[in-house]
Amino acid sequence: MDKFKNRITIDPEICHGKPCIRGMRWPVEVIIDMLGSGMSIEQILEDHNELEKEDILASLNFAKLYLSGHTIIDVA
């Protein structure tokens, strides 16, 4: 969990405060959408070299926490 905790950032100045990857303009919801559309982790990384595998895994972990009723702040 600790290795993913710092990969998701929330900043009101970036993407209207949506959870994003490492302060970049990559909302978690976009990562989840790419996975949901059938893209593999490898395809995402190939198309977007600024992302890392751990970013995608952190997005999935964030979504799991959110759906379970927890937030990233709860586990920080």
Image (cartoon, helix red, strand yellow):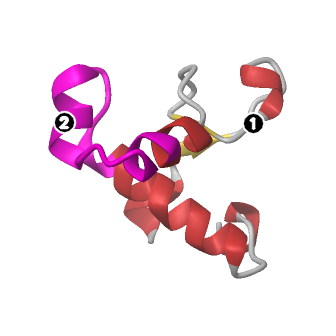
Picture quadrant where residue 28 is located: top right
> Which residue is drawn at the image coordinates 32% and 48% (left, top)?
38
**First in sequence: mark 1 vs mark 2:** 1
**Residue 7 shows in this picture:** no
Image: magenta residue range: 33-54
> Which residue position holds label 2?
43
Whole-number angstrom distance, CA of label 1 to CA of label 2:
24 Å
Q: Residue furthest front?
A: 37
Q: Is residue 17 left or right of residue 47?
A: right
Picture quadrant where residue 12 is located: top right
Q: Quadrant of the N terminus?
A: bottom left
Q: Is residue 6 left or right of residue 55?
A: right
> Which residue is drawn at the image coordinates 49% and 66% (left, top)?
61
Q: Residue 50's x, y, as percent?
A: 30, 21
Of helix, strand and loop, which one carries label 2?
Answer: helix
Q: Disc 1 vs disc 2: which is toward the camera?
A: 2
Q: Is residue 47 magenta?
A: yes
**Three-letter amino acid code of the residue under disc 1:** Lys
Q: Residue 67's x, y, as percent?
A: 69, 74
Q: Quadrant of the C terminus?
A: bottom right
Give yes or no for contact between labels 1 and 2 (Cβ–Cβ under 8 Å): no
**Residue 45 shows in this picture:** yes
**Three-letter amino acid code of the residue under disc 2:** Gln
Q: Is residue 55 above or below residue 4?
A: above
Q: Residue 2's x, y, as percent?
A: 44, 66
Q: Is residue 19 magenta?
A: no
Q: Is residue 45 above or below residue 63?
A: above
> Which residue position holds label 1?
18
Q: Residue 31's x, y, as percent?
A: 47, 41
Q: Is residue 68 above or below residue 5?
A: below
> Which residue is drawn at the image coordinates 70% and 68% (left, top)?
66
